[in-house]
Image: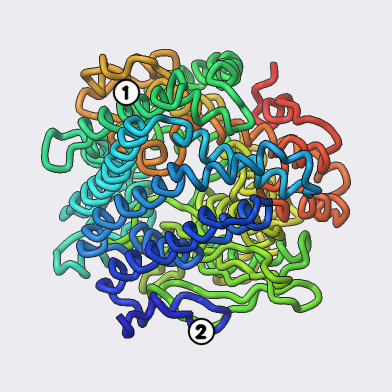
Amino acid sequence: MSSNILTKPFNTAFNTAPFSQIHNNNFLPAVKQAIKQAKAEIDLISNNSETPTFKNTIEALDFSGEQLDRISSIFFNLNSAETNDTIQKLAQEISPLLSEFSNDVRLNEALFKRVKAVYDKKDTFDLTIEQKTLLDKKYKGFSRNGANLPEDKKEQLREIDKKLSQLKLKFGENILAETNTFEMLVTNQKDLSGLPEGAKEAAKQLAESKEKEGWLFTLDYPSYIPFITYADNRELRKKISLAAGSKGFKNDALDNQHIVLDIVKLRHERANLLGYKTHAHFVLEERMAETPKKVLSFLNELLAKAKPAATKEFENLTKFANELDGLEKLEKWDGAYYSEKLKQKLFSLDDELLKPYFKLENVIDGAFIIANKLFDLNFEEIDTIDKYHKDVLTYKVTNANNDFVAVFYADFFPRAGKRNGAWMTSFKPQYTKRGENSRPHVSIVCNFTKPTKSKPSLLTFNEVTTLFHEFGHALHGMLANTTYPSLSGTSVYWDFVELPSQIMENWCYEKEALELFATHYETGEVIPMDLIEKIKASATFHEGMQTLRQLSFGLLDMSWHGYDAPETITSVKDYESKAFAETKLYPDVANNCMSTAFAHIFQGGYSSGYYSYKWAEVLDADAFEYFKKDGIFNKAVASKFKDNVLSKGGTENPMTLYKRFRGQEPKPEALLKRAGLLS
């Protein structure tokens, strides 16, 4: 055991993870040892003979299991960004152990008794707002997870949680395997008609790397999106679209249908066991939205505004495709293609025109410059810390006084061991202990277009906004300034967590911001004003259809988790079709299914929470309106946002924090106005 790097303090710069010294066979023994250590820490708290106080019970509990949290973060972040068969197998072993340990804590009667004793006497303690929040969170962590249940029900809960942890992992593994399995080799150059040069070059390079003749396309976003958007060959668009839409839905070894039904039933059973009507009722109790009724009312209100606009946009797109190519009926594999053509016609704007101005390195610098102007942060690339893959970039982040703020990792390109999409995560949280403010290690992971032999990585505008979105989450993590780890950074209500990320996207549309970093990768020319105006003008293009799409995902999520008889569902596809009925524009594709690849809600943490993207859009549109009032780089507004939102984590109720920043509750009108949906 002495040779296991994970069981010892990390003797590294900034206490970062020593990736190059970690071996796969270190994880399981290290997790087991860390669980043992965490259990001993819990025993000390629960067996303490002193009268329960905030310090010896609640605070001690929040700082317990630090090593276990650290090892788990490293392991599960690698399982998402740099996995392999060994790590996936280990995840199936480690997840149930962690699930069991967390249940051991939550169902520990002696511990709960002490927590409850402090909670019942909370008014007699002189607690700060943050301490009151932590006490409330800890008490609910027990009561909402079975502490008040009789012994037999507690056992039932343990069994459910164990099964759920394994099912969620399996769901994700199947999707990754499906994504990695599909390859479409194009051997006839004619079939590449319409594709941008960069996409062709990347496909050629990928084919060569696999010793194949021709051009290779996959379901990785930088390969899939250009093909579905630009390829003139409709049959091939259909082929790759059907492959993307049928992930986990082929009745084979990688099928996710039974997993979806099992997850939904177990979540419902768990909620019932704890006294809640549905999983959605359980989840939403700890959200700004509070109840399924409020969420559905919110989604349906937006639906009423967006549907007429979406229907009109779809009719116009159908008409345009008919006039252009005599197409009678738009299918799902036609949407992106004809939307792009129509956008080019209306705005003389396409990604190929914009990409030369969005070299990845310049966009990263742009995000850093904007963070400096707003929040006084400085980013210095360093090579003195370990990386888990050579493509990862590492930065030391400091403030205006040159104080160390955070370590920042950025991982931008797709590869076989990395799941699709983009996300922010952390390898270590921020907290304050024994007078020392321990700073966070934050990471963003994306899947952007790789550099080719002749071109650097040039981003689509959508990729630019994605980078800014994830960077917004990262700022939330980096600027954290709280006492307790479980309230730090992005540890906030789920429907508040997207505010810092979504507000950062707004700068991508502003002339003042774009001129800081959008320069042509060959000539150095700043992006022309007419292109900036076109970006702004096209920002609401097909906003009705986009909104309808987001709402459809939110409604599907609520349908799966807000229904009180999931055991009666037999067909995933039929159930999904019913949920999509009100938002449907394109004809249904029989062998496609969204739910079987809906990783946000069946693998990630968005179950009963997908609505929060739209919820946070209301917040971010309202908040950015405030920024624009006095200039997008107004220091006073930025400081208020930093002090009341970014640094505060989950220390107070989010609406309280928001109102302190904004001076009022958010108004949905700001979003509807920005989206062009106000009649």
Viewer-proximal residue, 441 or 47?
47
Would residue 159 appear left or right of 60 to someone viewing this image? left
Give the crowd class for mark 1: few <14, some 14-19, many >=20 residues within 10 Å.
Answer: some
Q: Residue 417 appears at what percent x and percent y? A: 29, 62
Colouring of the image: rainbow
Quadrant of the image occupied by residue 268: top left
Residue 333 seen anywhere in this rendered image of the structure: no
Q: Residue 552's spot in the image, x, y percent?
A: 45, 24
Kind of residue at badge 2? Thr
Q: Position of residue 206 (x, y in %)?
A: 25, 64
Instruction: Give the image quarter of residue 2.
Output: bottom left
* Quadrant of the frame with the C terminus: top right
Q: Which of 295 and 265 is in front in this view?
A: 265
Residues at marks 2 and 1 touching, judged by CB atoms closer than 8 Å: no
Q: In this view, does 130 lie above or below 14?
A: above
Labelled disc at residue 327: 1
Residue found at x 83% / y 55%: 639
Q: In this view, does 449 lie to the left or right of 57?
A: left
Q: Which residue lies furthest to the front in this view?
A: 49
Q: In this view, does 180 lie above or below 621?
A: below
| Label 2 sits on residue | 12
For the N terminus, the image quarter is bottom left
Q: In this view, does 21 lie above or below 35?
A: below
Count the labels in the image.
Answer: 2
3D distance between C-alphas at marks 2 and 1: 61 Å
**In front: 206, or 120?**
120
Apparent side of residue 105 relative to residue 165 in the rendered image (left or right): right
